[in-house]
């Protein structure tokens, strides 16, 4: 039987080349979906390997992806990354603004050098505002956004509870996918890439079934 129309469209519209600089679950979800749709995903891993490899779901999250070790903290790391981005359609990162600044990877400067590139940020809290450099842990986002309190009636006696399903990460990853595909569609007209932003806070509220 033929694939559903939505799946066929997904394959047809997938970006050709994705440089995956993500080190956390939402980035892995995003690039896994793109790889499944036919994109050539290259994981950029630090010496010692990506933290995603330690997750129990790694055999699924890593499927269909290539890998290359690049030490972004070395003298040649930035040049090596720049060379990879010159031929890429999309770059995905989950680094916080503080870490990106520490590495000397400025997205606006990257976009100026690679105007065709769609640069995608998936953070815990967004790249602006007072919480932007907080750790983007799923549990921390759920607690600070009030979701742990919202599910308190699931516990006996009722109390703020931790939801073990990473639905903030899953939603943020797929919001990023939608942003990437929309940016690529726009690039077909303008010839220019852009910066796409999403975060776990927006993700968790996008599919919040409690409120």
Image: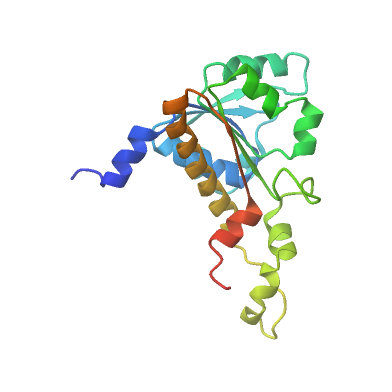
* Foreground of the two, 95 or 183: 183
- Residue at 72% across / 43% down in the picture? 127
Given the current orientation, which residue lies at the most extreme bottom position?
A: 157
Q: Work out which quarter of the rendered image holds the N terminus and state it.
A: top left
Q: Is residue 162 above or below residue 90?
A: below
**Residue at x 59% of width, y 61% of height:** 205
* Count of labels in the image: 0
Q: Residue 88: percent from the left, percent from the top?
A: 52, 22
Residue 196, given in percent of the width and then of the height, sits at 58, 38
- Give above or below for 86 relative to 15: above
The picture quadrant where one finds residue 167 is bottom right
Q: Which residue is at a point 73% across and 13% down the rendered structure image? A: 76
Instruction: Name the side, left or right, on which 121 lies relative to 1.
Output: right
Q: Quadrant of the C terminus?
A: bottom right
Residue 96 lies, in percent from the top left, at 74, 40
**Which residue is found at the position 37% from the left and 34% from the top?**
13
Viewer can see residue 2: yes
Colour mode? rainbow
Q: Quadrant of residue 162?
A: bottom right
Seen from this angle, which residue lies furthest front? 190
Q: Is residue 79 left or right of residue 203?
A: right
Residue 58 makes an appearance in the image: no
The answer to which image quadrant residue 154 occupies is bottom right
Residues 154 and 141: in front is: 141
Q: Residue 122 placed where, x, y %?
A: 63, 43
Q: Residue furthest left?
A: 1
């Amino acid at each position: 039987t033929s694939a559903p129309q939505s799946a066929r469209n997904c394959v047809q519209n997938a970006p050709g080349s994705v440089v995956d600089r993500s080190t956390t679950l939402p980035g892995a979800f995003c690039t896994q979906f793109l790889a499944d749709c036919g994109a050539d995903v290259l994981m950029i891993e630090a010496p010692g390997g990506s933290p995603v490899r330690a997750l129990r779901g790694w055999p699924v999250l890593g499927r269909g992806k290539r890998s290359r070790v690049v030490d972004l903290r070395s003298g040649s790391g930035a040049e090596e990354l720049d060379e990879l981005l010159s031929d890429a359609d999309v770059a995905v990162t989950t680094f916080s603004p503080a870490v990106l600044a520490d590495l000397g990877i400025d997205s606006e400067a990257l976009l100026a050098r690679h105007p065709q590139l769609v640069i995608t940020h998936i953070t815990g809290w967004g790249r602006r505002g007072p919480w932007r450099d907080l750790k983007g842990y799923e549990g921390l986002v759920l607690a600070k956004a009030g979701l742990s309190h919202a599910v308190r009636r699931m516990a006996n006696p009722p109390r703020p509870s931790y939801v073990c399903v990473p639905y903030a990460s899953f939603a943020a990853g797929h919001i990023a996918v939608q942003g990437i595909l929309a940016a690529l569609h726009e690039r077909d007209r303008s010839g220019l890439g852009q910066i796409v932003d999403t975060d776990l806070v927006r993700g968790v509220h996008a599919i919040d079934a409690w409120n």
